[in-house]
Image (cartoon, rainbow, N blue to C red):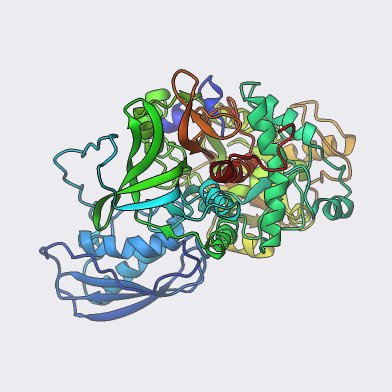
Amino acid sequence: MKTAKKLLVLFIAAACILTPAFAKRPAETKAAAPRAVTEMKAGTYTETVNGMHEGLVVEVQLAKNKIEAVTVKAHNETPGLSDAAIATLPAEIVKQQSIGVDTVSGATMTSKGILAAVEAAVKKAGGNPAEFKIAAAGTSVAAKKEYSSTPPKKWNETHEIIVVGGGFAGLAAAHSAKINGAKDVVLIEKMPVVGGNSQINGGVYAAYTSKKAATLQKELNLVPDTAEKHIADTLKGGDYMGDEALVKNMVYGSPFYLDMLFDNGLQVRKTLTRPGGHYGYRTYTTISGQGSDIVQVQKKMVEKAGVPIMTNTKMVTIYREKPLSGRVVGIGVETKDGFKTMKATKAVILASGGFAGDVPMRSRYVPMLTKELPTTNHVGATGEGITQAQAIGAEIMHMSYIQLYPFANPNGGVLDAYAVIPFSGPSSGVVYVDYKGERYVNEGERRDVCSNAAKNSGGFPTFCIMNEEIVKKGGFVTPAQLQGGMEADRIFKADSLEALAEEINKRTYDGRKVSIPGANLAATIKKHNGYVKAGADPDFGKRVDKGVMMTIESGPYYAIPQWPSVHHTMGGLNITPNTEVRDIYGNVIPGLFAAGEITGGIHGTNRLGSNAVADCCANGYIAGQYAATGTLPDFIKGK
């Protein structure tokens, strides 16, 4: 068993948590020098493979001894979600002359499809694919360049408000600043496309009410939720370490922003779920089961408002009038065209995300979170926005609270659309079982508890079990998602529980196998059915809502493998309820704001699932309006 799989989950609650169209262009990066390989028949080869979906068409141009160009010609991939792989991977294959390059985090299946197409082309040309399966060459740099925080004498460009980061929070902030009166707002994003972790988020949004709430509650026979319950659940879920004022801003702002998304075209499934740690049915799920649906709506809102988006633009320093005093007056950025300075006459809003994807940074605060542990994060979740703010005096808090997502794909730790199903299903009756086919946790528990229980179950991985009735009536799984999961071999199907155990046992998980006794699995589900009918769970104390939670008595039956993966960082910059960044003395740093995962203090020790989007969107909107006008939105209570 690998070290990563042997680690017990930490005592701290840390153990818990674009462009919509693809670019039809060849890789233009200069290729590495040819090396000795089996001679190929030069030409252009077109391969049709599977990515996230069927129909990924890749054109590969080969010379006798090298890969000349790779072009994605057509695809049916999820809009936005696969853009990073399509935009960057072909060029990297050509540059490295390798099909052993790293896949793009968050777009793993698309990446693997592109790599498979190149491999097929090489083979068809008479080459030996193994000769191209080399690890990507490391980047050789003399030293990381350090930039001063002293303002330049001359600026390359000037704006009123600069927003750093193109995820949920940054898009919300940029749009809010512009519609609330700021004349010149610009959004920068270091990656080739906007979205980041928001693209690969599970598409689940917690809001105690909305313009759709009453209809859904009536159709689903659910009791209406309240803001007070949402606030109470969030505070309790974070072991009362969250700042109540910040929690209230999130809760009150969440319905406001969700309705705005609805007004701009966001569609959700006809369901309201009650995931672990929540005691109200308040979680909405996007159609795709991915945050990319929300990002695409936000991006259109930002574009409609007239805010330019600058991708491939990385903030490398923050300028303050004096080293540790005065206003923040701008930032320095690295671009494809070199370094430049950007002046902000009103504000800089930091929305550059967390640091769960940066192994040195996360292990500095939690030593056990080493490189052996996988992460759900995209490659850009590296936390430099936090350290650059620290360099000018910003205070940080709660940095050791790092959450694991309990239901990620065991093969690589990815949070794909299928990994959201176990999260959404507890209130409908899904069951989690271990390698023995037995329950190991209250399925309705919060993420840290579920992650701890999985790690302590004695085996790897664990599984989510459900049946056709839950799939159809629960509303959190679409037919396309179910079919896609089976095609991708992420969801297994059988007509009996004994046969389902056989399907589970056929597969390997990160190179290993399990041997679940079919009789044990059947007995576990039978016992759980009895608890659902009785309305009480004596084994784990799970809440059973009669008329909502279903039994698993008839097939077909389904299983989804799952395992914890490093997910969300609850710590970050210390902010006021106005989203102003505080310095190490507790004073506001003028002109500097922050929202989203870059901040700390909202979720305490553990973030309840589906609160992330609410946090980013509500506080991003607050940051944009307050930076532009010095006033708070009407949804803020007691302002």
The residue at 44%/20% (across/down) is 584
**Left of 160 or right of it: where is 220?**
right
Task: Decide: is 479 above or below 151.
Answer: below
- Specify whether 273 is left or right of 82: right
User: In this rendering, would 213 be left or right of 364?
Assistant: right
Front-most of 291 and 429? 291
Camera sees residue 566? no
Locate the N terminus and report the quarter of the image it occupies: top left
**Rendered residue at 68%/26% (across/down):** 235
Q: Is 377 or 434 nearer to us in this picture?
A: 377
Figure check: 572 above or below 519: above
User: Along the line of sight, which residue is nearer the eye, 495 or 165?
Assistant: 165
The single residue placed furthest to the bottom in the displayed view is 43
- Please provide percent x and percent y for residue 585: 46, 18
Comparing 281 with 477, the one in front is 281
Question: Can you see residue 144?
Answer: yes
Instruction: Residue at 30%, 79% (x, y): give it.
Output: 45
Instruction: Residue 546: name its quadrant.
Output: top right
* Residue 348 placement: quadrant: top left
Percent coordinates x, y for residue 358 in the rendering:
37, 37
Residue 128 found in image quarter:
bottom left
Relative image position of residue 556 (x, y in whole percent): 72, 57
Dividing the image into 4 quarters, which one contains the C terminus? top right
- Left or right of 428, for residue 562: left
Q: As displayed, is residue 313 above or below residue 452?
A: below
Q: How many marks?
A: 0
